Image: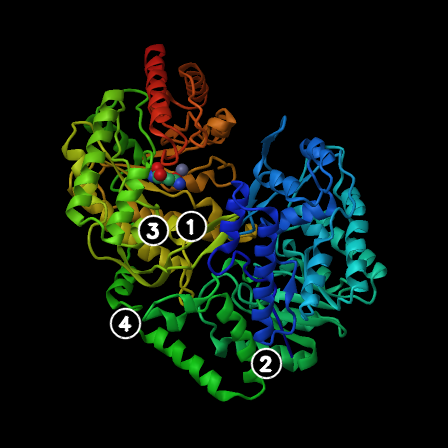
Amino acid sequence: MQTNVLGYPRIGSNRELKKANEAFWAGKMSLERLQLTARELRRQNWETLQAAGIDLIPSNDFSLYDQVLDMCLMTGTVPARFKPLMESLANVSSPELYFAMARGYQKNGYDSTAMEMTKWFDTNYHYLVPEFDASQTYRLFYNKCLDEFKEALSIGIHTKPVLIGPVSFLLLGKIKDEQLQIADLLDKLLPVYIEMLQSLQQAGATWVQIDEPTLVLDLTPIEQSLFQYAYNKIKAAVPELKIILATYFGGLQDNTALTLKLPVQALHIDLVRAPEQLDHILSLIPSAMQLSIGVVNGRNIWKNNYDQSLVLIKKAIAALGEERVFIATSCSLLHTPYDLELEELPLQKNWMAFAKQKVNELKELKQIIAGNTSLLALNQAAMKDRSTSSIIHKPAVKARLAALTDTDDQRKNTFGIRQKVQEEILQLPLFPTTTIGSFPQTEEIRKLRADLKKGKIDQDQYDAEISKAITESVRWQEGLKIDVLVHGEFERNDMVEYFGEQLEGFVFTKNGWVQSYGSRCVKPPVIYGDVERIAPMTVKWSSYAQSITNKPVKGMLTGPVTILQWSFVRDDQPREDTTMQIALAIRDEVTDLEKAGIKVIQVDEPAIREGLPLRHADWQQYLNWAVKAFRIAVSSVEDATQIHTHMCYAEFNDIINNIAAMDADVITIETSRSQMELLEVFSVFKYPYEIGPGVYDIHSPRVPTVQEMTELLEKAVQLLPARNIWVNPDCGLKTRKWPETEQALRNMVAAAQNMRIAI
Ligand code: GLN
Ligand code: ZN
């Protein structure tokens, strides 16, 4: 039995790659130094894996920016707009073109926008979306996988090169010209892949991992047929090369039979996300095929439960024999932080494993199979410690969850009744104006929070400064004649971390960074135990803001699904249960805000859509509990209290009935970039609630004119009743500067006033 790692994080244990990239972009680091840093990181990774005795060590899993972008450059999938730049460069593999595609290019008379970015399956990693257009000729532009294979060989390490498979590469991209057919594109790309694979074979590679994670998605018959075609061609061209076809993030389900027919030496399956597929696959696997079983979770930070993994491993061995089985990480470890040893977490550390520890887990599982019982006993002790720990398990929280009744997620009356009561109380004009919550986070504000953390100032000094910032922002909003004010979120570093830090059941790592895209890394909070609110979290600042004005101030909270989605979540209970616990904590906050006299409360849920499962058949079940969690969070209030929610996108076509089921009195969404087109689904659905379609894009410093915002609102009133329309930007303003924010909001209020006159 051998061990197999699908990929390793590449940012460096101290985010060296991030720092080097950013210094290079700023012109503060030479290309040679950047490449040296990259080479050093690769060497460290390979040596770590070698030291742990891993049999299949990945190469070409490294990337300066993104592994999908690497494939674009390697195969010549360069969007037409970069052609002039490409032709001007002596060397197409130069980082000039590479970073231009990643980040856009505005230099020397060239002006091209960056490639689009989107989420990598259901992870928080973003990849650059390949663009296929008629201008492209595919050829082996640059053989990165061969270079890195040889680089490892030169330090004595024989690696398994990793490639994104041709079919997934195509399916994850966008075909830009209508006349292009996916099957033709595949035909053109395959020779490039084959050339790459031949070069690897010649250089002495034995195993090559080809990732086809799209095999866990719903595929059309045409898409399914591409796999057989591609792998037959590959097999014919490199019959000696051993290919391990990697699938992850879900089960193969209806794609199982077709996958098992592919002429590859081994198949990798994700048994963390889909353990139930093992039996089916064992019953169908051809006798010559080897199986890599992903039992160590590449998506989370928890220690592996060896007893559970051993059941799967033993079952595979019993069916196939040890020689045909690899034990593996479920997917690349890209989605986990580097090294738990860098953390000081007295209690929780014994329950956790980061990338380096996960590699070690594979080694230990192999040793246990070989008869080492003391390693198993140690792991069992850690599991027991966790399953019985009193800092994790709080009977009161579990009891409260169990006692939830059918009415706990129901407002007292229907929206029709609530709307009248709220109109009476709030006395807002038609087209009421508001903002989404945050105001510019200036250097001073950031420094203030940092100084408090470092102990440079005390709580009283900090509070005095925050009150000052809130007071100024309230006066400023009054001056602009905004109708529903916000306090500005100056005290918040991040919309999840701020709540996580105040809730029980959360812990924060010092160095648990994970790549989000390019040089951007995130440090997700860890939800390790039952979540409980011990004291109000936002009441102090919201009620302060309300106390200094006669206009309504919106309370501002993050919703349960978003808090869950942007954290590392405990794996010892269903995600649904954890979400409900968070929902109860938010519910208490909502109740307290109402008690403190806050009449409008916004609960942001920007992550509801990204939480959708990969398979359509699983959507409704997720949406049911996601919507229910939101309703539990907001349903304790009286009819008169107006509940808002906010989402940073507006693609609601396929989930509009669930959005309506959230029963929020007001929803604010992003629509300005689509010229209100995205609002149509609300119109067709006859969405009954109030809605604030964003009238300007907050991602750009550009100040929109009164006229263009008026025009957008005119479009909105053609789609929805005027009585229901709010006027607000697309999202929060924390990344903007004050001068442009002031101008933009002044114009926005003027546009709302135009509409009131017109109606
Ligand atoms: N209230 C948050 C803000 O304004 C919402 C952020 C978001 O939707 N991502 O910053
Ligand atoms: Zn938003």
Q: Say which mark, if any, is on residue 314.
A: 2
Select label 3 or label 4 by which is in front.
Answer: 3
Disc 1 crowd, CA 10 A, few/some/many (<14, 14-19, 20+): some
Name the amino acid, label 1. Answer: Asn
Identify the disc placed on residue 390.
Answer: 4
Mark before the other along the chain sequence, 1 or 2: 2
Secondary structure under badge 4? loop
Which dot, 4 or 2, sits closer to the camera? Answer: 4
Q: Amino acid at mark 4?
A: Ser
Q: CA distance from mark 4 to mark 1?
A: 31 Å
Q: Is residue 664 visible?
A: no
Residue 542's label in the rendered image is none
> Which residue is nearer to you in this view: 301 or 618?
301
Q: Which residue is depicted at the point 60% across and 30% down?
A: 107
The answer to whether residue 91 is left or right of residue 427 is right
Q: Residue furthest right?
A: 236
Q: Nearer the viewer, mark 1 or mark 2?
A: 2
Residue 679 is situated, as x and y percent measured from the top left of the image, at 47, 28
The N terminus sits in image quarter = bottom right
- Ligand 1 shows up in the quarter that is top left
- Quadrant of the image occupied by residue 732: top left
Q: What numbered label is drawn on residue 624?
A: 1
Distance from disc 1 to disc 2, alpha carbons, whole Å, reads 37 Å
Q: Tag 1, which secondary structure?
A: helix
First of labels 3, 1 by sequence position: 3
Element marked by disc 2: helix
Identified at 43% across, 46% down, the residue is 608
Q: Is residue 192 above or below residue 687?
A: below
Q: Is residue 607 above or below residue 349?
A: above
The residue to which callout 3 is attached is 497
